């Protein structure tokens, strides 16, 4: 492992010890996961709406799913009503 300190060094060591990932690969995985969960609420709602719409779901189901997914985000999002979710997407 390099001598450069990483803020998630303990997680990288854990991943290299418990998987077939090397230190560089583990560091990249950690960075990707952190970036994924750092997405702002508004961007997440818009992205998920587009993804689910692309799968053919209708808005009523889409907004229910997004509302159910939001509490599991890394930084808990405020509770948003279905109307607030629609306003994020459609303005």
Image: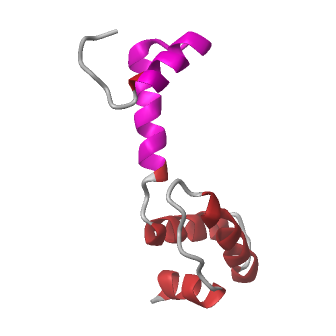
Residue 36 picture location, percent across and down: 47, 48
Vertical placement of 84 versus 68: above or below?
below
Residue found at the far front of this picture? 10
Residue 58 is covered by the magenta coloring: no
* Magenta-drawn segment: 10-36
Q: In the image, what residue occupies the spot 69% across and 81% down?
A: 59
Going by the image, does 35 lie left or right of 74? Answer: left
Residue 81 picture location, percent across and down: 63, 85
Residue 55 picture location, percent across and down: 70, 63
Decide if residue 70 is in sight here.
Answer: yes
Quadrant in the picture for residue 54: bottom right
Q: Judge by depth and name the residue closer to the eye, 23 or 86.
A: 23
Q: In the image, what residue occupies the spot 70% across and 68% down?
A: 68
Vertical placement of 44 versus 80: above or below?
above
Going by the image, does 26 lie left or right of 20? Answer: left
Residue 33 is covered by the magenta coloring: yes
């Amino acid at each position: 492992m390099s001598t450069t300190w990483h803020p998630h060094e303990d997680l990288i060591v854990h991943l290299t010890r418990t998987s077939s990932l090397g230190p560089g690969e583990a560091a990249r995985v950690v960075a990707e996961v952190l970036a994924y969960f750092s997405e702002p609420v508004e961007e997440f709602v818009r992205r998920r709406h587009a993804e689910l719409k692309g799968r053919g779901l209708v808005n009523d189901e889409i907004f229910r799913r997004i509302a159910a997914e939001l509490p599991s985000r890394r930084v808990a999002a405020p509770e948003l009503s279905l109307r607030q979710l629609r306003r994020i997407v459609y303005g």
